[in-house]
Amino acid sequence: MTVQLCRTVRPLGLCALSAAAVLLAACTTVGPDYRQPADAIAGQPAAAAPFEGAQPSRRSPDAASAQPYSQAPLPAHWWRLYSDPLLDRLVEQALAHNTDLRQAVANLERVEALEAEVDGASKPTIGVNGGPSYGHVSGLSLLQPGYQPPSDFHYSAGVAVSYQLDLFGQIRRASEASHASTEAASAALDLVRVSVAAGTARAYADVCSTGLRLRSARKSAELQQEAVDASQRLQQAGRVGVIDVSRARSQAQQLLAALPPLQAQREGAVYRLATLTGTPPQAFSKEVTGCEAPPRVAGAVPVGDGAELLRRRPDIRQAERELAAATARIGVAVADRYPKITLGLSASSAGLADGFARRDTFAWSLGPLISWTLPNTGVVDARIAQAEAGTRMAAAKFDGTVLTALRETETALSAYAHELDRNAALQASRDEASTVAGQARRMYQSGKVGYLDALDAERSLASGEAALAASDAQLADDQVTLFLALGGGW
């Protein structure tokens, strides 16, 4: 049931009513004020502590690599740590032309426009109307039955100003919710920037890592082809049989078979780079395809601590702002229990055209409009319950986002540190295999060992080269994953 009251009151009474309404509006705002929940995980000391995986005490006693992390803050443009001008250009191009980023920018602009619309409810509304007409009024309207007034030109014009008194803070709460939603959209834009920068660096690292693996595979294939040629010469000299030649050729074909998948992988990474930078694949620069050295940050990687992570990660900020918006919506729902008062002022002029602006053509009114939906407890309480449940859901999402950020960071720290140790061990193994393969090759050519021994040594070397190249690629990917988990790039 909706009740609306509107009457023209004496100026003194109107002033008294307006003053009382303004005073009430200044001190009454229903619903809870937003504060980060006291039990939020983001407020716990453990969440802001230094990362567990970055502590020197966590390193294995037999770790082959040096301490990989420092407590220095992560720079915003972390990709510049690689000191790779080509990577810098690619990231800048992606941040300027990426289509996902353009969508996020447009979404932020849309949300800002929605906020402006909500804020407009706190400002006076002005309406203007008017128009000419030709005809005559009825005789009855002039209280002269049977009288036929002459036809003539008429006009009407009016202006109305209305202002809703925010007695219980519903407009303010709606504005708070809208502003928090805008900040959440801004954080979402930053999150896309982080993803685009990391995606570009990862695709570039994939191109370079695959180039390294291709170079290693081609080198192994070339060495094996030299072994085939040596076997053929030894067969012609009668020193080895046809079986040794066949084994050498089989090994050479196996090594050549590893090249096409790597070439396809590199081309796929190039196409990803083209998409990320907003460029058609056909028009993308071929300069990238010549990279054969995966980017890697020299020395310790700056990671900061948990407190910096909580401030830096855009998804955490987005979740926190969504919680603030949900809290403000409780006040919007609660305010529906109370009446709304709108002050209105209207003035108009109507009459014959030749009497335009005469004193007797003017009319005006000033007074409040009170509208109140008498509390339907079930409906209003249901809306409040919905808003409160939405706030609890947003709080749970906020906690979950913080936990996910901490887990992703610790996982990335652990993965990178252990891959460094694995890489050092693989490099030592590859060096040993290279020495053995060289000795076995010379001994086979001199007839001191059979070809099976030389073949096993070559296979071990090829396997070691491939494993080391794959580890180098994984290291590059792990570094990008770490920077992504740390939330840098905006």
Image (cartoon, grey):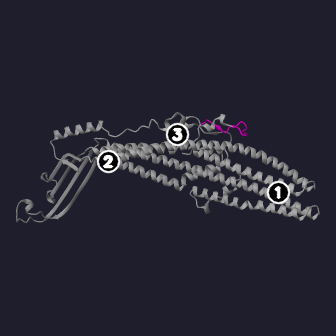
The residue at which mark 3 appears reads as 310
Q: Residue at image x 48%, y 43%?
A: 398
Q: Secondary structure at mark 3?
A: helix
- Residue of label 1: 223
Could you tell me residue 388's position as x and y percent? 38, 44
Foreground disc of the pair 3, 2: 3
Write the start and end of the magenta stretch as one range.
60-72
Does 320 sit above or below residue 437? above
269 or 354, nearer to the observer: 269
Q: Kindly identify the amino acid type of the residue bearing the numbered disc 3.
A: Leu
Real-space Cα distance between discs 3 and 1? 52 Å
Q: Residue at x 80, y 60 (%)?
A: 251
The majority secondary structure of the magenta stretch comes to: loop
Whether label 3 touches label 1, CB < 8 Å: no
Count of marks overlaid on the render: 3
Callout 3: 10 Å neighbours few (<14), some, many (20+)? many
Q: Is residue 160 visible?
A: yes
The amino acid marked with disc number 1 is Leu
Query: Which three-letter amino acid code belongs to the residue tagged 2?
Result: Ala
Image height of 165 relative to 273, above or below? above
